[in-house]
Image: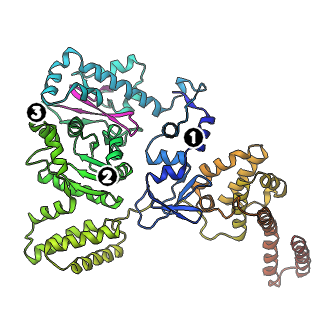
Amino acid sequence: MAGIDDSVIQQVKDRAEILEVIGNVTQLKKAGRNYLGLCPFHNEKTPSFNVNPDNQYYHCFGCGASGDVINFVKESENVDFVDAVKMLADRYGVVIQESKNYSPEAQSEKARLYELHKDAAEWFSQNLKKTEALSIREYMKKRGITDSDIATFQIGYAPDSWDAFINWAKSKNYDLPLLVKSGLIIHNEEKKSHYDRFRHRVMFSIWNDEGKVIAFSGRVLEKDAKGAKYVNSPETPIFHKSSVLYGLPMAKANMRDKKTAILCEGQLDVIACHRAGLKNAVSSQGTAFTEDHARKLKRYSEKVVIAYDSDNAGKEAAFKCLQYLLPVGVTTQILNWGNGEDPDSLYLSSGAEALNNCLSSARDSFEVLIDHLSTKFDIYSPDGKSKIAHSTIEHISRIPDTIKRSDYCQQVAERLQIPADSIFRELKKFYRRSFARGPAQEQPAPAPIPFIQELTLSLKAELTLIELLSSYEDLAYKLTEELPTEYISQSQIGHCLSELLDLTMAGDWYSCKDVLQNQFAPANKDIAKIMVQPEYNSDMLREDLEKAYKECLTLILKTPLTNRRDQILRLLKDPNQNAAELKTEFQQIMNKLREMK
């Protein structure tokens, strides 16, 4: 895989507006020169996510996430750096010019895994067309899977063989260690042998958000087949199932257009929905619904219709989804396919119109929840009302919007025929109990990034010089001449200042901002703060900038003298010290300090 020229990367940074990119993921409000919002990387109720449009930089003071627009796309979309650049380039009309400086031997492991999965998907697809897969094709046809479905969703077939895939992969020059890491083959340690993971199964390709194949799910369609119904790829460097939504590359444009996502339970359900024209359908991949899934749906939609099976197990699973969907702020509905039905079976029995009719009858999730609880508890008894109310209140507490919370409290009260004040009081009690044992819904932020709790005056001065140095080239070169390196502290902040000075002296001042953003700001909260909340800007008078520069430089140069002065004052209290020599040195220091004013 070729690399991307540095000039293209810079062009992407220049064109991509960080406020626009981040604003599509989390709502931002202007706060002074910055913009503030809820962090998209961890659940929080009080905004601590800052975006600085001047520096094109973001930083969360809650979890420490920070970076430029490329890093934001990389982290929020769970893609590598190259894919993040390509996504932004496509969005902002930047033509990718690939560098010739990379050879196939220099490809990263991830790149080889992407390439392997792309080739494997094609191989599985070709196998489905062979004579040995005729019975599979006929069975799929009976299940309503069309040729169009097969092409759109890259459905294939894994032969009934222990080594067909291994032999094919070897012929394509894929080595065994990579094949094992991909999860497509299994290493038997005891027998020192390898064999195919997927055998005699219909193969469903699994993609990342950008449509790259990253894993597979092998399904046995025959009811009487031996073995597990599904066999899925294990987690790999390119596949993390807790954040993958099946069908997202095909669905996200429709999700944005309709501002609605349909959340199904399985792959065949997603395919049936798309076949019926409901092209905003997705499903979680081989795992329970997670917080990552909820955040991803929030990026593309304002409403999520949970379209799980209509039996009790399906309803319980739908209610579990609410604990992740409600905190991200989406409207939630639950769909009833009918007695014992799911999208796949309903399409087979009644066609596309039936699926669309069901979608139009989706109900608010709290209405469905209360109905379900009413089958478990007596809604007319005090005890039953209490149990229903408290179960519902726990879900209401997850809603970040106070108006929505209030409205749902009213609805629950009306449904249970009790005063609304009772629900509000119980909600407040729930919050107090949750607060007493720690935040109930807010997930703990990652461990804070290291930073100095209380900055000394000299460290504050170094921070200011970092800000000035990275923004004003002439002051940077001036500082290289006026600040000896031995005066710089041995702290993280001092190391940052030294690194920027070294870059400037090497004639590479223009790299200072990137180094500051990518290397030091993510690792130090105080440095990150000056990136998102700078004290000095281009609107200021030049004389004020130079005054700040001089004051900081003077303070740093004076620091060793003031430290020694204070040390001498302590030593003079010791009768065993040579007071005459100390007083002479003290006077010399005071003279130097006066000269530096």
Query: What residue is shown with label 3?
Result: 223
Label of residue 250 in the image: none
- Please identify the quarter of the rendering in which residue 348 is found: top left
Q: Mark 3 to mark 2: distance in Å?
A: 30 Å
Mark before the other along the chain sequence, 1 or 2: 1
Can residue 311 be seen in the rendering of this structure? yes
Amino acid type for the residue under numbered disc 3: Lys
Q: Residue at x 44, y 51 (%)?
A: 24
Q: Is residue 143 above or below residue 288?
A: above
Q: Mark 3 to mark 1: distance in Å?
A: 52 Å
Amino acid type for the residue under numbered disc 2: Thr
Query: What residue is shown with label 1?
Result: 12
Foreground of the two, 380 or 450: 380
Q: Is residue 70 above or below residue 130?
A: below
Query: What residue is shown with label 2?
Result: 290
Residue 113 belongs to magenta span: no
Q: Position of residue 581 (x, y in %)?
A: 91, 77
Foreground of the two, 102 or 49: 49
Q: Position of residue 455 (x, y in %)?
A: 65, 69
397 vs 537, left or right, is: left
